[in-house]
């Protein structure tokens, strides 16, 4: 995005903060001094990963979503022009509350204090190279390392990471040859599916959010992969190996 674009956004953010303050009956503006001190960036990082990361890449948060703009790129020019964290924070806060009608990003995925914490975290790290330190370094546990999924009585269940990371809870599964019913529980609001592919066979579930996606197919002995076919999700880490024997 161009810097002019961002300037417009910050001006808009300043106006919206005043509005937000009125609406919340409190100091809703993240540009105001008092709140700035008290924002909890550790919680902000956790919420960002859970609620925003499936759609946005943010290097320091370890998220790789591609549905929305890469937030490091979005604020790169702002950093070059030496904008403070608070300005970026104000833009992010306004975006969370008022993303714009008819667009892809849902409004108020986080609200109140949560929105302030997320905005404070993004304001502190977007467009900055390097790694998070201190408490931020351990704020989010990397998903995907769970115990392998094992087929039982013709059923194989592989859940989506409930914490919002673009991962299934495990990247390893095993099954016996034969017909298998697959299930993909997904407690997040971001849609995913489960594709099983290998040995000339491919079958999958529909894309489901907030529910359990189901499908079925026939497996022969051999090696398969499983992954999410929503654009960008497999590349971000939603894949694993299924061994049939
Ligand atoms: C469902 C996907 C999705 C989720 C979840 C999501 N966003 Fe977005 N976001 C987008 C898209 C797409 C855009 C571009 C504008 C649009 O089409 O809505 C965007 C735009 C933005 C922008 C403006 C970037 C720019 O270049 O102008 C910011 C900042 C932002 N999002 C922050 C967040 C934060 C913080 C959260 C979590 C509270 C979040 N987003 C959750 C999809 C998402």
Image: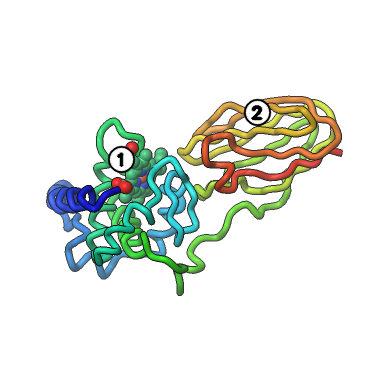
> At 49% across and 68% down in the image, what residue appears?
137
The circle drawn on residue 107 is 1
Q: Is residue 204 left or right of residue 75?
A: right
Indicate the position of residue 175 as horizontal and vertical percent values: 80, 38
Report which quarter residue 180 is drawn in: top right
Q: In this orientation, which residue lies closer to the viewer: 100 or 216?
A: 100
The local secondary structure at tag 2 comes to: strand
Indicate the position of residue 6 as horizontal and vertical percent values: 23, 51
Disc 2 to disc 1, C-alpha distance? 31 Å
Indicate the position of residue 90 as horizontal and vertical percent values: 23, 56
Q: Is residue 210 left or right of residue 34?
A: right
> At 73% across and 48% down in the image, what residue appears?
148
The circle drawn on residue 189 is none
Mark closer to the chain start, 2 or 1:
1
The quarter in which the C terminus is drawn is: top right
Asked whether residue 31 is in view, the answer is yes
Q: In this orientation, which residue lies closer to the viewer: 224 or 73?
A: 73
Question: What residue is disc 2 on?
Answer: 204
Instruction: Determine crowd level at label 1: few under 14, some 14-19, many 20+ residues with C-alpha closer than 10 A.
Output: some
Report which quarter residue 119 is drawn in: bottom left
Above or below 211: residue 142: below
Q: Is residue 2 left or right of residue 61?
A: left
Asked whether residue 117 is in view, the answer is no
């Amino acid at each position: 995005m161009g810097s002019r674009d961002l300037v417009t956004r910050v001006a808009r953010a300043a106006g919206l903060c005043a509005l937000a303050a009125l609406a919340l009956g409190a100091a809703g503006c993240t540009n105001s001094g008092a709140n700035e001190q008290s924002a909890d960036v550790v919680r902000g990082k956790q919420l960002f990963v859970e609620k925003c990361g499936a759609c946005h890449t943010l290097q320091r948060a370890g998220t790789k979503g591609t549905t929305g703009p890469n937030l490091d790129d979005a604020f790169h020019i702002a950093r070059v022009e030496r904008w403070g964290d608070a300005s970026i924070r104000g833009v992010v806060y306004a975006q969370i509350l008022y993303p714009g009608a008819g667009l892809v990003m849902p409004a108020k995925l986080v609200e109140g204090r949560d929105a302030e914490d997320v905005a404070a975290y993004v304001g502190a790290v977007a467009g900055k190279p390097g790694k998070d330190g201190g408490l931020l370094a351990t704020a989010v546990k990397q998903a995907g390392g769970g115990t392998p999924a094992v087929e039982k009585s013709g059923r194989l269940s592989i859940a989506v990471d409930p914490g919002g990371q673009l991962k299934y809870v495990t990247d390893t599964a095993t099954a016996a040859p034969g017909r298998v019913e697959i299930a993909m529980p997904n407690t997040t609001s971001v849609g995913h599916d489960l594709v099983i592919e290998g040995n000339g066979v491919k079958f999958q579930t529909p894309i489901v959010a907030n529910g359990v996606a189901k499908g079925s197919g026939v497996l022969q002995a051999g090696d398969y992969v499983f992954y999410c076919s929503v654009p960008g999700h497999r590349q971000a880490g939603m894949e694993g190996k299924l061994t049939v024997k």
